[in-house]
């Protein structure tokens, strides 16, 4: 296998060395570790639940270093529901247009106390307290034209009614190029600092990273610094454009490199490319964030869908890519396995102390990563078998690929011969515009031939993945009516990156459909007709050549997950791993 050389990483290292490190980088010298309420409670978390999670966190995860507890989105919405948002909801807000905790959910916030009592409780457990906010100013504040604290301006003077979030209806953007736009951000961060907030996740700001958002990021950085409190800044959602790397690392401690990450293999496989692309910008105080860890009990009480092998893969990748480790499950219901994969001390040492983290090779989805240990002598190695059954079902081998289709309602007619085919594979790929809201549909998918006509929606697929939500027949990926041009249509709703596999019945010669973008974003539609179905894969050997990681001679290898020494090796080291499986190792030269 050949090592992957990144000239950009070399040039960036020289650039970074020439810059003075911002003070706020010292507030997160290692990747943050903690918990966030979104995966288990969505928008509905309460004070009671938060205190229960803090108790469990202090007992089970704080000893391993997990110390940031974050209340996620819509803590200011009295009637919040699940993972969805209600347009026009009445939000709790003070006289200056600053959102405050909903009292029916956070009763200790009464009498203007805000989150201070809850933050004090979290701090009493030895933990740090974090909150989620949306960028901008509440629409409700603009409609009521509330004053901006400390200025002669009002919300209408600074609100940008043409800058809105495509998925959350609560806010308008703020014109941060105006002095009083900065003053609004100063006022809200002054409030958060008075509550004792240690960590803030700002949403709807890292994608598409336009000029409005860029100015707001700069305003937020200034506002935090003015408080005098070391508040760690996290930006969402992803994918943050890689081209924004130099700017984002100079203003934030961590930023999302993906849209919401859930417990589906397709999302995990896609993460290998994402963490590799962000290698030049990874370092003390500034961390590309692969998102929360959806394991254990999540989504209002269901167990994770990740297999144990997939959980080892996720934790091995997050650790060797030094992503923040933010658990999303219910800490009051931690099982032994989940606790072990979260708290394994040798894995955490990789995440918290390694350097020069990089991908070494990737061939046929057999992937090798490495990093330097803190002692400057040893190396860490992660081996990944990211193959799946039918691994030859690759977009690169597609019989048909559309041009990039961009914009709500834009479409492409598709017609592909399926003669001699055993499987039909439908791909939806990201169009590459840096905007991940890539909802799409296969409208009226039809097989035709001597056997007549057969709607694909009448068949059961072999497998189906979607980058967000889930593929659904005659529904969108978020389980809404499938609408195109204002009318309900039949088909398959999905979201990039998506791979849907069908066994082809006999008697059909042609597949036709219309690929439609069903929201903002851009995609590429692809069709592959597999004419020689592979036998399912069970395992594969992944090997690292020691020369590729700068080691010669004999070495000792330790398995970090098993916490046992494997013996002495020379020249290379490999392991046979199950599909979707991984291994994490420490390599010690013997000289």
Image: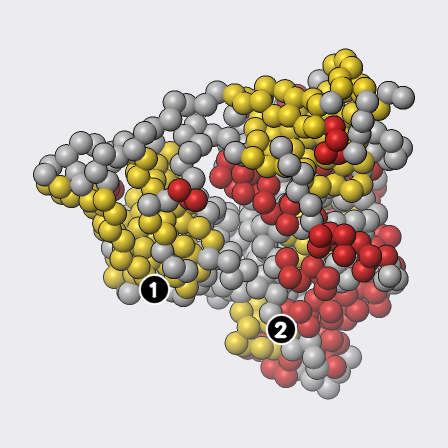
Q: Which mark is residue 212?
A: 2
User: Helix, strand, or loop for circle 1?
Assistant: loop
Is 97 above or below relative to 75? below
Return the x and y of residue 498 as percentages of the image width and height: 42, 45
Query: In which image quadrant can residue 190 be found?
Result: bottom right
Residue at (78% x, 42% y) in the render? 356
- Density class for disc 2 (Cα within 10 Å; few <14, some 14-19, many ≥20) is some
Is 441 above or below relative to 583? below
Give the tally of numbered discs: 2
Q: CA distance from mark 2 to mark 1?
A: 26 Å
Residue at (71% x, 52% y) in the render? 7
In the image shown, does 576 or 546 lie closer to the viewer? 546
Chain-order first, disc 2 or disc 1: 2
Viewed as shown, does residue 535 lie left or right of 172? left
In the image shown, does 28 or 257 lie closer to the viewer? 257
Report whether residue 170 is seen: no
Q: Which mark is residue 366?
A: none
Return the x and y of residue 394 as percentages of the image width and height: 43, 39
Name the residue beneath numbered marker 1: 409
Which quarter shows the C terminus?
Answer: top right
Which quarter shows the N terminus?
Answer: top right
Viewed as shown, does residue 305 lie left or right of 456? right
User: Helix, strand, or loop for circle 2?
Assistant: helix
Report whether residue 238 is seen: yes
- Density class for disc 1 (Cα within 10 Å; few <14, some 14-19, many ≥20) is some
Residue at (59% x, 19% y) in the render? 576
Viewed as shown, does residue 48 lie left or right of 538? right
């Amino acid at each position: 296998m050949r090592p992957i050389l990144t000239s950009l990483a070399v040039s960036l290292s020289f650039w970074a060395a020439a810059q003075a490190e911002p003070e706020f980088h010292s507030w997160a010298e290692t990747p943050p570790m903690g918990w966030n309420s979104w995966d288990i409670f969505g928008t509905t978390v309460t004070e009671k639940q938060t205190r229960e999670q803090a108790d469990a966190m202090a007992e089970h995860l704080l000893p391993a270093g997990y110390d940031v507890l974050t209340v996620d989105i819509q803590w200011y919405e009295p009637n919040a529901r699940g993972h969805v948002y209600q347009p026009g909801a009445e939000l709790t807000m003070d006289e200056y247009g600053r959102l405050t905790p909903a009292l029916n959910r956070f009763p200790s916030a009464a009498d203007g106390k805000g989150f201070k009592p809850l933050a004090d409780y979290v701090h009493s457990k030895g933990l740090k307290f974090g909150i989620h906010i949306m960028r901008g100013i509440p629409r409700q504040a603009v409609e009521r034209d509330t004053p901006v604290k400390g200025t002669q301006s009002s919300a209408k003077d600074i609100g940008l009614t043409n800058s809105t979030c495509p998925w959350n209806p609560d806010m308008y953007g703020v014109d941060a190029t105006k002095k009083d736009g900065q003053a609004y951000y100063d006022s809200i961060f002054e409030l958060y600092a008075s509550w004792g907030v240690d960590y803030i996740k700002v949403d709807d700001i890292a994608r598409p990273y336009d000029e409005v958002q860029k100015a707001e990021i700069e305003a937020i950085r200034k506002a935090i610094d003015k408080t005098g409190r070391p508040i760690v800044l996290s930006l969402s959602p992803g994918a943050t454009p890689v081209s924004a790397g130099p700017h984002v690392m100079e203003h934030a401690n961590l930023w999302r490199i993906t849209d919401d990450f859930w417990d589906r293999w397709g999302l995990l496989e896609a993460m290998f490319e994402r963490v590799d692309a962000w290698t030049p910008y990874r370092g003390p105080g500034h961390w590309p964030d692969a998102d929360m860890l959806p394991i254990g009990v999540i989504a209002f009480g269901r167990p994770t869908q990740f297999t144990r092998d997939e959980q080892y893969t996720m934790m091995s990748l997050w650790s060797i890519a030094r992503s923040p480790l933010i658990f999303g499950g219910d800490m009051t219901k931690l099982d032994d396995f989940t606790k072990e994969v979260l708290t394994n001390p040798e894995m955490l040492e990789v995440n918290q102390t390694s350097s020069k983290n990089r991908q070494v090779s990737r061939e046929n989805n057999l992937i090798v990563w490495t990093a330097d240990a803190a002692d400057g002598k040893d190396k860490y190695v992660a081996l990944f078998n990211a193959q799946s059954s039918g691994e030859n079902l690759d977009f690169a081998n597609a019989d048909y690929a559309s041009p990039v289709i961009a914009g709500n309602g834009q479409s492409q007619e598709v017609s592909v011969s399926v003669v001699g085919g055993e499987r039909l594979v439908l791909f939806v790929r990201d169009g590459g515009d840096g905007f991940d809201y890539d909802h799409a549909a296969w409208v009226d998918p039809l097989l035709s031939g001597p056997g007549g006509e057969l709607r694909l929606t009448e068949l059961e697929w072999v497998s189906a993945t979607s980058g967000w939500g889930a593929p659904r027949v005659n529904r969108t990926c978020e389980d809404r009516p499938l609408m195109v041009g204002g009318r309900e249509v039949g088909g398959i709703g999905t979201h990039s990156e998506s791979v849907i596999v069908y066994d082809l019945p006999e008697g059909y010669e042609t597949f036709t459909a219309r690929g439609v973008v069903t929201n903002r974003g851009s995609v590429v539609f692809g069709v592959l007709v597999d004419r020689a179905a592979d036998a399912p894969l069970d395992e594969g050997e992944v090997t690292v050549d020691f020369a590729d990681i700068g080691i010669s001679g004999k070495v000792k290898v330790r398995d970090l997950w098993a916490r046992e020494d494997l013996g002495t090796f020379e020249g290379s080291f490999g392991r046979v791993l199950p599909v979707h499986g991984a291994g994490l190792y420490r390599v010690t030269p013997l000289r």
